[in-house]
Image (tube, grey):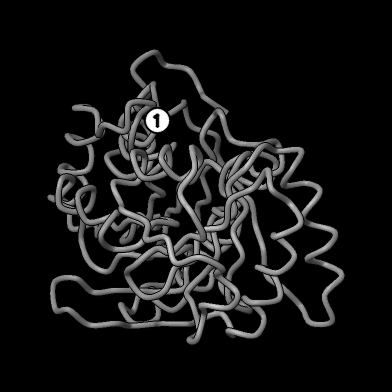
Amino acid sequence: MRYRLLVADIDGTLVNAQREITAPVRAAVRAAQARGVRVCLATGRIWPSARRFVEGLGADPPVILANGALVYDFARDEVWLRRALPAEHARAVLRILKGHPAVQPHLYVDDRVYIGQMNEITEAYQRKDSLRAEAVGDLADWLREDPMKILIIGPPDALAAVVPEIDALPFAINHVFSEATYLEVLPPGVSKGEALRAAAAHLGVAREEIIAVGDNLNDLAMVQYAGLGVAMAHAPDALRARADYVAPSNDEHGLGEVIERFILSRAPRDGTDAS
């Protein structure tokens, strides 16, 4: 199979634990692009946070943002797909979260992030995502327009306690874990897989010609959609079980190994199969 499109998650996939793009990964991406393969990124981040990785890698347009709520052609400044969360649904979730003080909701409206008040959770989030969140008081009362998503950050057990209450709402809520401490509430029907489907149709690329690489459950839909779905070695069991191939970890330049094996047709350096 000649692959024409490679789509990779950022955190835990493209970058290592220090959130750096390693030299082997960068070199492999450039070699793939030199062969005519489009290399795109798909992330839960919004454009102001994702931009430095897109530009630092020299990735091709489009970029999939907010876990699939937005597909953005940054070269032409064109939006290919945009879906928002109904404001009334978002407010219902935010009201639930008031009863869970161990978690912190982050409300994404366009390219900005809003919180109720600053705490240690948001301070760590700002450092990680290189974003500044704006405190506006009661989020449910403040919200007037449809947001892109709600990112809920907290301890895994606290997030687990939130899920049944969200699921008990009288309308369907789309939610997915992007990290053990990140629960994302997304617009209906939104996923990286659906965004990849839309992007591929726009580009005229068949799903059999796509490689998708990710490391967490928010990557599952795109890994399942692609002709070759790849999970990183440190991915949850549920993702690795559904992947066609399991790559070395991000600290072992796993994305570069995928490119060498399936696009550049080179055997792994140690001659072993990471799956």
Give the image location of residue 262, x and y in percent.
Answer: 38, 42
The quadrant of the image that shows the N terminus is bottom left
Give the image location of residue 168, x and y in percent.
Answer: 87, 70
Quadrant in the rendering for residue 56: top left
Q: Residue at x 41, y 74 (%)?
A: 109
The answer to whether residue 2 is visible is no
Tell whether 239 sits left or right of 23: right
Q: Which residue is mark 1?
A: 254
Quadrant in the rendering for residue 266: top left
Q: Nearer the viewer, residue 235 or 240?
A: 235
Q: Residue at x 46, y 26 (%)?
A: 249
Tell whether 22 sits left or right of 43: left
Give the image location of residue 63, x and y in percent.
Answer: 31, 64
Tell whether 109 sits left or right of 103: left
Amino acid, disc 1: Gly
The relative height of residue 65 versus residue 172 in the rendered view (above or below) is above
